[in-house]
Image (cartoon, grey):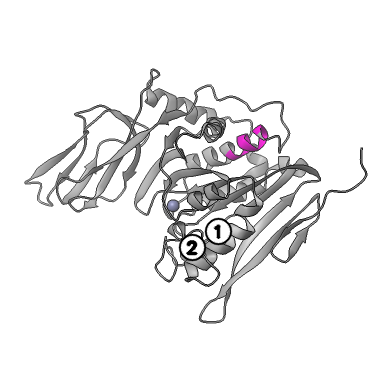
Amino acid sequence: MSSKTRDGFTVGEHTIDAGTRKTVDLPVSVLSDHTPVTLSVHVVHGKRPGPVLFVSAAVHGDEVIGAEIVRRLLRTPALRSIRGTLLAIPIVNAFGLMNHSRYLPDRRDLNRSFPGSPKGSLASRLAHLFLTEIVERSDLGIDLHSAAVHRTNLPQVRVTPDRPEVMELAHVFGAPLTLTSKIRPGSLRDAADKKGVNILLYEAGEGLRFDEFAVRAGVSGILRIMRHLDMIPGIATPKRKLPTIVSRSSSWLRAPAGGLLRSHKNIGEAVTEGDILGTISDPFGEEETPVVAEFSGLMIGRTHLPIVNEGDGLFHVARIGSDIPAEKRIDGLTSELEDDVLLDEDEII
Ligand SMILES: [Zn+2]
């Protein structure tokens, strides 16, 4: 065995020695009141070589669930013997997080501002910093999101269509659902793709809320990926008894009328064409409009807000072609997550 130690890992002006971990702050800008804003990255640089994985959260500032997933990930004892390097960024958009907002103060969406430029808008500068300091140093990224405020998502991984290697990783992650979705121009996934870095996009839970099931499914999925890449110890990636449900298309069912919505179905429940998923009524109960499912599938997202305008997205339904009833699979996965060997509660919660 060579006695030579592995090189340190450099990010910004900082170098992290092999076998150590450290939080580094990359300067972004200074607020109008003189408060510095940073992109803070926790680097776990293993003694032994291996892949570089980044895990990012709160690219949309109000999608806080990923920050809790990253916090628990960083407490995982298995990281003590990591191969390769983990870059964990619990809050990419600090501006949005503090303002409980998806956006930056310049009202731009960071996830539409990639690849960005050092001379561009604030969003564009932050995108450029993230791309050059994090994405370009990585082999793979997991980007954590939630639904928007007042909406919730069944934990799901979104992957680019026609990428067998990414689909394989989505199976390893083992979220209840895997949805293929086209790359949006200007997104992190778009920019990373052009640099040859694959991204798994995890979408789970509600904006501005923590949700235990969504957090556990996220932590467990990341640890499965790290095991699969041989970054953390383990005999093999434990297979889920029930595999992820794959869907290639989904649609939002929109409000046929304005009014007050009563929902009759929840995320993770099967939907049959013709089912009444909710009822919209006027405040006097004189007029009732049913919201009818237009096709069969699985409910993967819904609004939590009973106040609706005509055209609002109410229920997000994925088309699935599956022989095992989807609802049963979701129930099975929920109980599997409850006694997941990867999630040692005393250690990481
Ligand atoms: Zn998002």
Position of residue 230 in the picture relative to residue 178 (left or right): right
| Magenta-span inclusion, residue 347 | no
Q: Secondary structure at mark 1?
A: loop
Q: Quadrant of residue 218?
A: top right
Image quadrant in which the C terminus is located = top right
Q: Amino acid at mark 2?
A: Leu
Q: Which residues are magenta?
A: 222-228
Q: Secondary structure at mark 2?
A: helix
Tag 1: Cα neighbours inside 10 Å, few (<14), some, or many (≥20)?
A: many
Disc 2 beta carbon < 8 A from ligand 1? no
Q: Which residue, given by chain and number where applicable, does mark 2 sit on?
A: 97
Image quadrant in which the N terminus is located = top right
Which numbered circle lies on residue 177?
none
Viewer-proximal residue, 166 or 54? 166
Q: Amino acid at mark 1?
A: Ile
For marks 2 and 1 on the same chain, the one whose residue lies earlier in the sequence: 1
Horizontal and vertical percent for residue 250? 33, 37
Q: Quadrant of residue 140?
A: top right
Looking at the image, is 72 positioned above or below residue 341?
A: below
Q: Which residue, given by chain and number where applicable, does mark 1 sit on?
A: 91
Residue 286 seen by the camera: yes
Mark 2 and mark 1 in contact? Answer it, CB < 8 Å. Answer: yes
Marks 2/1: CA distance? 8 Å
